Image (spheres, rainbow, N blue to C red):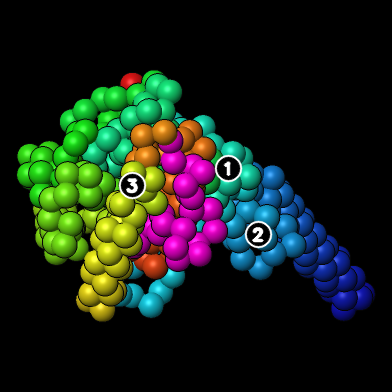
Amino acid sequence: MEHDRSEESVEPRKASCFGFLHREQLIAAFAALGCFLVAAIVLIALAATGTIHAGSPSNDSTSQKRVVNDVSMPGSTSTPTSTALGSATSDSTQPSFTPSVVNSAAVSHVIPLRIMALGASIVKGETSPGYLGFRKPMRDELVDSGFIVNMVGSVQLGDFVDNEVEAYGGKKVTEMHDYAKKIVPQSLPNLFVVHLGTNNLLQNKDTDKVGSQMKDLIDYLLTASNQSTVIMSTMLTNKVPDKEPKVLDMNKQYRDMMKGFEADQKPVVLAEMHPSEGVPGTPTTDDIGPDGSHPTVKGYEMMASLFVKAIKEAEGKGFFRKAVDNGTPEDGSVEK
């Protein structure tokens, strides 16, 4: 009888052990389920905040792609890539201020342009209403294309915001070289827009030397502001009697000078303004005003588009570098 009681007492102990094992398994199962639910909630939260893009193995999506320019030095074979506007995410390469209002479909260009327009009365915009000249439509077109722009110079002229310029009527190439020595080291532009030579022509002074004089000026600009690019233009067609043959010769000097800059891989681009080369959109005699030298409003607007074309060409060649920080705002419309 004692043997039977011993066997009976073993069975409850076995049942108790098995019951304990079932409880442990249930607890483990509930713990695993809880971890799974927490992980799922975290993933859903990340997807909702945009940290993870659904349906993509990476953090880039086709519709929200931000690419930053690989800034190239002059002579580099790489081509800078623009930043697509389609993403609302912040980027440390973007300016910290409110830029000029641009077309929402435009491309955003990473390097802001601190532009000095340098020349004589045509650069001032003489004969155009409000002295808008080519500077106002050029700036507008650049901003509409996504550039951040600040026009700089010691003269404020024109019925528009951001109207600084370095231009003086009647001045020849060497005279503007002297003016540049006074202002360039202070303003340090990273882009010069240069149009000169008409006063050499009209005053019949050094017309056979403008090529070498322009080279000296451009070499100075690139040295004094060593982050800069220069856009220089050929001269416009001229209706003053007997002047056009000299215009053709002076422009030839400018083009020959450009061959040297290109061979040396210097950041200089020619904006062709004379119709003799067959470039579309160059002003013809119909676009020159009654005085024979200054453009009409349409002529100035054509100059603006040709300068913008050359500026974009310079960007495509990887010439642009960020201007030296001297306290000048990146956006000229903000400081006004």
Q: Secondary structure under badge 2?
A: loop
Q: Secondary structure under badge 3?
A: loop
Along the line of sight, the residue nearer the viewer: 35 or 30: 35
Marks 1 and 3, the one that precedes in the sequence: 1
Along the line of sight, the residue nearer the viewer: 60 or 108: 108
Eye-nearest disc, 1 or 3: 3
Indicate yes or no whether the magenta region holds residue 253: no
Q: Quadrant of residue 220?
A: bottom left
Residue that extends furthest to the front in the rendered view of this protein: 241
**Residue 262, x across and y down, in percent:** 29, 74
**Residue 166, x across and y down, in percent:** 21, 36
Q: Residue at x 82, y 64 (%)?
A: 22
The residue beneath circle 3 is: 241
Q: Do the residues bearing badges 3 and 2 touch, measured as CB atoms within 8 Å? A: no
Query: What is the spatial separation of the Cα atoms under label 1 and label 3, in whole angstroms?
Result: 57 Å
Q: Which residues are magenta?
A: 268-289
The residue beneath circle 2 is: 61
Q: Secondary structure under badge 1?
A: loop
Q: Amino acid at mark 3?
A: Pro
Eye-nearest disc, 3 or 2: 3
The residue beneath circle 1 is: 88
Q: Residue at x 51, y 38 (%)?
A: 298
Q: Amino acid at mark 1?
A: Ala
Query: With respect to residue 195, does 123 lie above or below?
Result: above
